[in-house]
Each structure stands twice: as structure tokens, then as C-alpha cells.
Amino acid sequence: MLIVDFDPNQEKAIEQAASLLVEVFSEHWPDAWPTMAAALKTVRDSYGSNGIGRAAIDDVGNVIGWIGGLSEYNGKVWELHPLVVRSDYQRKGIGRALVSDLEGQVRQGGGITLRVGTDDEDNMTSLGGMDLYPNVLEHLSNIKNLKAHPYEFYQKMGLPS
Ligand SMILES: CC(C)(COP(=O)(O)OP(=O)(O)OC[C@H]1O[C@@H](n2cnc3c(N)ncnc32)[C@H](O)[C@@H]1OP(=O)(O)O)[C@@H](O)C(=O)NCCC(=O)NCCS
């Protein structure tokens, strides 16, 4: 597996990356990328002037995962958005490798913080559907992962979410 920049001329890789967003997010976040058009825009935005887009490719050149970063606060802070690994390649260390790669890219450009947000839309955690106010932090500290929600992955990566 190699992690490389997106090449705007490699239309096949860009389409594979967009398909991953549509397919992999459809089960738990169906509104995230309902169409290829929306997903293609996200891929293209990731390697635009305000972003970083990095693709994990297998030995025959297929995109098996990818990560994006969006610059904030003049490049001092970056939002990790999005991150996806093809279903049949999950839990093999590719997500970790992509986060670590993005951290390196951000650091090289003078960034000091990487942040991420993650939603729970279908009760994958004990906080799904709850009113979190007024004791938001207390609720958060008691969160339980019911259906392999990715917040636990991000905790393992040391990212504030
Ligand atoms: C979340 C995702 C990116 C993780 O990538 P991955 O390649 O499967 O993760 P890795 O194999 O690198 O896992 C690293 C560690 O996190 C753990 N982990 C991975 N996914 C997890 C999950 N959903 N819940 C709990 N732990 C998880 C792994 O077990 C591993 O733990 P270890 O180091 O103790 O062995 C991937 O599963 C994915 O694309 N999921 C669907 C889309 C998604 O949720 N994206 C993020 C939305 S904000």
C-alpha cells in the first residue's frame, strides 16, 4: 500500500475515491454523500488550494482509502475531513496510516492542531438521540460504543473529537 497525493488528471482514482464515500457512508450516514456528484466535489475540494487530499492505493493502483484535510486559522489548525477505508480493507491499519500521513503533511506545512468531528445519526453510541444539555461534558465522559462508532478509532489516534 502507498499513500500519495491525488493527481487531478487521474480521473479513475478520483472516481474510486468518490465511490468510497457514497458506498461506505451509506449504512450509518446516508445523508453524508447521497450522490456521486456530492462525493466528487468533496474529493476535488480536498486537493484544492485550501486542502490536502491523500489516497491509499493498493499494488495495482486502486484507491482503497483516502483522507482529506481542510485548512483553518491560516494553516495553524486543520480539520480532518473526510476519512474512509474500503469495507474489505478495514481493521488492517490503513486508517491509522492515513491519519499519521495527514499529521505529517500538516506538520510540514506549519500546522499545530488537527481536529475532527464525527456524528452519531443512528444510535451507534449511547449518546445517539439524547439531549446532551446541560451536562454535555458529563454525558461525553460516559459515552459507550454500541455499534463500532468511529469515535473510538479517533481516540486511539489521539485526536480531539
Ligand atoms: C473508521 C475507519 C476510517 C478506520 O479505519 P481502519 O483502517 O479500519 O482502522 P485501523 O485498522 O487503522 O484501526 C486502528 C485502531 O482503531 C480501531 N478501530 C478501527 N475502527 C474502529 C471502530 N469503528 N470502532 C472502534 N475501534 C476501531 C482498530 O481496532 C485499531 O485498534 P488497535 O490499534 O488497538 O488494534 C474505517 O473503519 C472507515 O472507513 N469506516 C467507515 C467510515 C467512517 O466511519 N469514517 C469516519 C467518519 S467521521
Image (cartoon, rainbow, N blue to C red):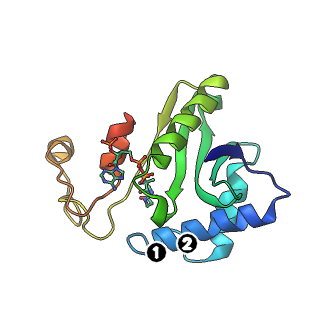
Residue at image location 54% in from the left, 32% down from the top: 103
Residue at image location 51% in from the left, 35% down from the top: 100
User: Horizontal placement of 161 versus 104: left or right?
Assistant: left
Rendered image: mark on residue 79: none
* Quarter of image, res 121: bottom left
* Quarter of image, res 35: bottom right
Disc 1: CA contacts within 10 A as few (<14), some (14-19) or many (>=20): some
Q: Secondary structure at mark 1?
A: loop
Q: How many discs appear?
A: 2
Q: Which residue, given by chain and number where applicable, does mark 1 sit on? A: 26
Disc 2: CA contacts within 10 A as few (<14), some (14-19) or many (>=20): many
Q: Secondary structure at mark 2?
A: helix
Dots 1 and 2: beta carbons under 8 Å? yes
Tell me where residue 147 appears, x and y as whole percent: 25, 64
Q: Which residue, given by chain and number where applicable, does mark 2 sit on? A: 22
Query: Can residue 7 be seen at all in this image of the molecule?
Result: yes
Placement of the C terminus among the 4 image quadrants: top left
Q: How far separated are the C-alphas under marks 1 and 2?
A: 6 Å
Residue at image location 50% in from the left, 34% down from the top: 114
- Does the beta carbon of the residue at mark 2 sit less than 8 Å from ligand 1? no
User: Horizontal placement of 73 versus 41: left or right?
Assistant: left
Above or below for 87 versus 8: below
Tell me where residue 23 appears, x and y as whole percent: 52, 73
User: Horizontal placement of 135 versus 14: left or right?
Assistant: left
